[in-house]
Amino acid sequence: MGIDLRHYESGNYEAADHISKRGNPYARKILFKMIGTMDSVAKLPNHPNHIVDYYEKKKQSSQSKGTKKIAIAAVSRLIRTIYHLVMHNQTYDYQKASLGR
């Protein structure tokens, strides 16, 4: 999908990690924008979401990381959640997702 980190290391040199550019760039953009949309919707009453909870917690706790890196981490969590729901034929339940942390 292209949201995994590329790591380069040679001798004493260690490059900063970047997301890989493999995969579909349109899918990557859609997933990235979904995090922003989910963040907006989660602020409405009765729309809690554990992925947005994770995103907000990381944004507040980290001064050095940009929000893009945090959003990519949230995209990764979103993909894992969707995969689990599809593989187990379940619907999303905030209470169950919150217990699974």
Image (cartoon, rainbow, N blue to C red):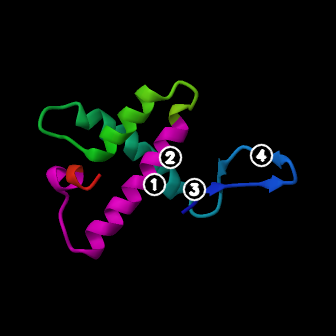
- Looking at the rendered image, the disc whose residue lies closer to the viewer, 4 or 3, is 4
Q: Is residue 38 magenta-colored? A: no
Q: Which mark is residue 76?
A: 1
Q: Secondary structure at mark 1?
A: helix
- Looking at the rendered image, the disc whose residue lies closer to the viewer, 4 or 2, is 4
* Contact, mark 1 vs mark 2 (Cβ under 8 Å): yes
* Contact, mark 4 vs mark 2 (Cβ under 8 Å): no
Q: Which mark is residue 48?
A: none
Q: Secondary structure at mark 4?
A: loop
Residue drawn 33% across and 60% down?
Answer: 81
Give the labeled residue for mark 3.
25
In the displayed structure image, the side of residue 40 where residue 17 appears, left or right: right
Query: Residue 42 falls in which quadrant of the image?
Result: top left
Horizontal and vertical percent for residue 56? 36, 33
Horizontal and vertical percent for residue 80? 38, 62
Give the labeled residue for mark 2.
72
Distance between the alpha carbons at the discs numbered 2 and 3: 13 Å
Give the labeled residue for mark 4.
15
Quadrant where the N terminus lies? bottom right
Type of amino acid under label 1: Ser
Q: Which residues are magenta?
A: 68-97
Q: Earlier in the sequence, mark 4 or mark 3?
A: 4
Residue positioned most to the right: 11
